[in-house]
Image: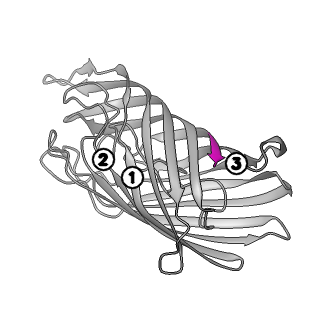
């Protein structure tokens, strides 16, 4: 499931609750085994953007360094629902963000608006994730709710909460040939956002796709491609949208791996990836690195 949360730097601020590649790294739609899985992800982003509205102000020359720790748990029930496995999940993120930026003053000069913050970010909940398997093809549908639980204060240089709700309706499709050890997965989604009432800014509806391709080199090790495409379907709105509709788009590609240590008896999975933005418009042009350790009970 796509468990997502990010700093207050959105389409409002040239980012959003969508974290590129957060859907996963392997077999995105394959039904999970019944039981509990806990996971911890370290997610790192470093990027820059020429201008954005942040905290109600138009800012220029923004540089961001972000480190998030995403603690997550999911539980898959044994009883099928509509012929599918049913999974619920939750994630609580926290971390540190460093932002360098300037604001345009009344006389046209630049005012430093840099800062750093260690805080909670916005939690994500998945009340429903359904997975079906049809031989080599698997399908998933899910709903993720991102709640404004993170630290937020209007006028602060940077916040790790976004101060609005998001609702991400997503799907995933996986083709996996176990004999050849090859997998291709694609996971599109539509994210709807409520208004940030502190800034009168509503980030427009967002479309996103994560995709992976893996080749197993042994029973417990695989490498492959990672990527994402992001596009706002409608412009930003509200009195706080000082730069107009400010539609964002981005495309990133990179590499990833999966390692299942034999000593853990198949209960531990370690995945990692790096992705680079090939292009980004009105969104942080970034590099992303993440490492996840997941344990199945």
Q: Residues within 10 Å of mark 2 (few under 14, many from 20)?
A: many
Q: x, y percentage for residue 211?
A: 60, 61
Residue pictured at 41% horizontal, 44% vertical: 5
At mark 3, the secondary structure is strand
Q: Which residues are magenta?
A: 292-297
Q: Residues within 10 Å of mark 3 (few under 14, many from 20)?
A: some
Q: Is residue 182 above or below residue 164?
A: below
Give the labeled residue for mark 2.
147
Total numbered labels: 3
Q: Is residue 135 magenta?
A: no
Residue pictured at 16% horizontal, 43% vertical: 240
Asked if the residue at tag 1 contacts the one at tag 2, i.e. Cβ–Cβ closer than 8 Å, the answer is yes
Q: In this rendering, which labeled residue sits more in front, label 1 or label 3?
A: 1
Give the labeled residue for mark 1.
125
Q: Residue 255 — which label?
A: 3
Asked if residue 282 shows in the view, the reply is: no
Q: x, y percentage for residue 6?
A: 40, 41
What's the CA distance linking mark 3 and mark 2? 31 Å
At mark 2, the secondary structure is loop
Helix, strand or loop for the magenta stretch, by majority: strand
| 211 with respect to 116 (left or right) | right
Q: x, y percentage for residue 189?
A: 44, 64
Residue pictured at 48% horizontal, 76% vertical: 81
Q: Residue 57 — which label?
A: none
Q: Say whether disc 1 or disc 3 marks the residue closer to the N-terminus.
A: 1
| 260 with respect to 27 (left or right) | right
Q: In this rendering, which labeled residue sits more in front, label 3 or label 2?
A: 2
Q: Say whether disc 3 or disc 2 marks the residue closer to the N-terminus.
A: 2
Identify the image quadrant of residue 30: bottom right
Q: Say whether disc 2 or disc 1 marks the residue closer to the N-terminus.
A: 1
């Amino acid at each position: 499931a796509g468990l997502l949360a990010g700093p207050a730097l959105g389409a409002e601020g040239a980012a959003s609750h969508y974290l590129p590649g957060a859907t996963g790294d392997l077999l995105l739609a394959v039904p999970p085994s019944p039981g509990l899985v806990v996971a911890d992800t370290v997610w790192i982003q470093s990027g820059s953007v020429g201008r954005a509205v942040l905290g109600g102000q138009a800012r220029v020359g923004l540089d961001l360094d972000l480190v998030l720790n995403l603690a997550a748990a999911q539980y898959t029930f044994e009883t099928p629902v509509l012929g599918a496995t049913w999974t619920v999940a939750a994630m609580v993120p926290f971390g540190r963000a460093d932002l360098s930026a300037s604001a345009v003053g009344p006389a046209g000069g630049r005012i430093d608006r840099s800062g750093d913050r260690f805080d909670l970010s916005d939690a994500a909940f998945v009340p429903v994730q359904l997975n079906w398997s049809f031989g080599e093809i698997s399908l998933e549908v899910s709903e993720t709710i991102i709640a404004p639980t993170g630290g937020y204060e209007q006028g602060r240089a940077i916040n790790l909460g976004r101060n609005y709700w998001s609702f991400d309706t997503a799907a995933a499709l996986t083709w996996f040939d176990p004999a050849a050890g090859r997998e291709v997965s694609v996971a599109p989604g539509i994210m709807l956002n409520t208004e940030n009432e502190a800034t009168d800014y509503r980030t427009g509806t967002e479309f996103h796709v994560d995709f992976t391709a893996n080749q197993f080199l042994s029973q417990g090790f695989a490498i492959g491609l990672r990527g994402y495409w992001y596009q706002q379907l409608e412009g930003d709105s509200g009195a706080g949208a000082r730069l107009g509709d400010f539609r964002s788009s981005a495309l990133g590609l990179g590499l990833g791996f999966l390692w299942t240590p034999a000593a853990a008896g198949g209960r531990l999975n370690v995945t990692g990836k790096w992705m680079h933005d090939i292009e980004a418009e009105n969104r942080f042009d970034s590099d992303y690195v993440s490492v996840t350790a997941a344990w199945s009970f």
